[in-house]
Amino acid sequence: MNLLNLLIVDQEAMMSLKTEILEQPEVLARLLENQRATIETIAAALCNYDIRYLFLAARGTSDNAGLYAKYLWGAYNRMPTALATPSLFSLYGKPPSLKNALVVGISQSGRSPDIVEVIREGRRQGAPTLVITNAPDSPLAQAAEFVVDIQAGPEQAVAATKTYTAQLMAIAMLSVALNRAAGEADDRWRDLQDVPTLVRQALDLDPVIERAAERYRYMEQCVVLGRGFNYATAFEWSLKMKELAYIIAAPYSSADFQHGPVAVVSQGFPVLAVAPDGVVFDDMLALLKSLVNQQGVELLVISNREAALSLAHTPLRLPIRMPEWISPIVAITPAQLFSYYLTRAKGYDTEAPRGLRKVTLTQ
């Protein structure tokens, strides 16, 4: 093996989950710089179709990115989003009609056969198909008409971090580009340009989060709350806690939580909440006040509002000035760090979660 190959092997060996978490500002900045023109071209082409709704297929972390798309494209593009049931395509062989749908696949690897089959069926039915992936040469990308390469670079860690935030950024860029292509004045590109800096500021919490994680090293179960755009954040944070720290972490919207699941909490029960400023903040705050003052829960909050931070036993402060619609791209990063440090505090291997592989091939 020559010196160059040795250096490449050494560099890959040094890559870790922590490295990839900290890499996210650069990944997001690169995506904005390199893919804006491609995404605007795709948006212009999609305006030639009679699209009435979005039909979205994904698994795991990518499925959580799909939850963000459901809120964002609904709120800003007035486009209803249906989340696919891939087994109808791959196992049952009874796909629904996709007339007037934009069929979207989201996958880090682009190799899950069931997601590929949804896109292929979209092409068979004559629907426009779009994929968001980190693998532009993958079977998923080859099956689609339009491809957004998130350009996150190799992701060695089993737990996806930088590919998740890059997927969110691609979804947000598509939302803005579709508004532009439809002839609507929109200055949301400026908000997106601020995201890499906001993520970098959130990652500055690293030493605070490392200390905070020690407090929760014996935690075995918790609930994770979010609402609106950050409903996706609650699900992704919950997933990271499960796959890394092996915690039974149940995600809920603050509204759904009050319809029964609130009964599981009592004195000292851990509640993790993501509650940045925005339309749903008052609702989140009212629930958190009740949980702390009446049920005595142990509260960890990710927020940029003092009213929520002051309630928490463990407050993690987000950048103050941040539009709600981009907050999921920023808010998940301290949650990723918390999951990483909690895993280490529990003595588990952050690089090799038990029973998991980087690519899961579901049928």
Image (spheres, grey):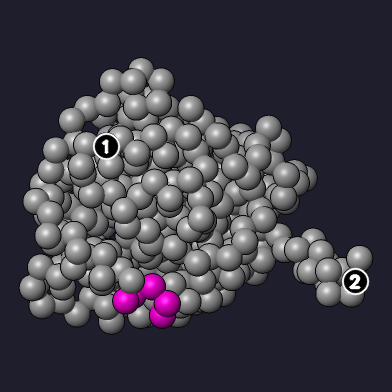
Label 1 Cα neighbours within 10 Å, binned few <14 / some 14-19 / many ≥20: few
- x 21%, y 55%: residue: 73
Q: Position of residue 264 (x, y in %)?
A: 42, 27
Is 36 part of what is drawn in magenta?
yes
Q: Which of marks 2 and 1 is nearer the N terminus?
A: 2
**Residue 291: percent from the left, percent from the top?**
37, 42
Q: Above or below — where is 179 with respect to 338?
A: below
Q: What element carries label 1?
A: helix
Most foreground residue, 12 or 328? 12
Disc 2 crowd, CA 10 A, few/some/many (<14, 14-19, 20+): few
| Viewer-nearest residue: 49 or 289 | 49
**Chain part drawn in magenta:** 33-37
Q: State the residue at coordinates (34%, 41%).
A: 119
Mark 1 = which residue?
124
Return the residue at label 2: 2
Q: Is residue 33 left or right of residue 349?
A: left
| Residue 334: percent from left, percent from top | 52, 62
Circle 2: element type: loop
- Screen quadrant of the N terminus: bottom right
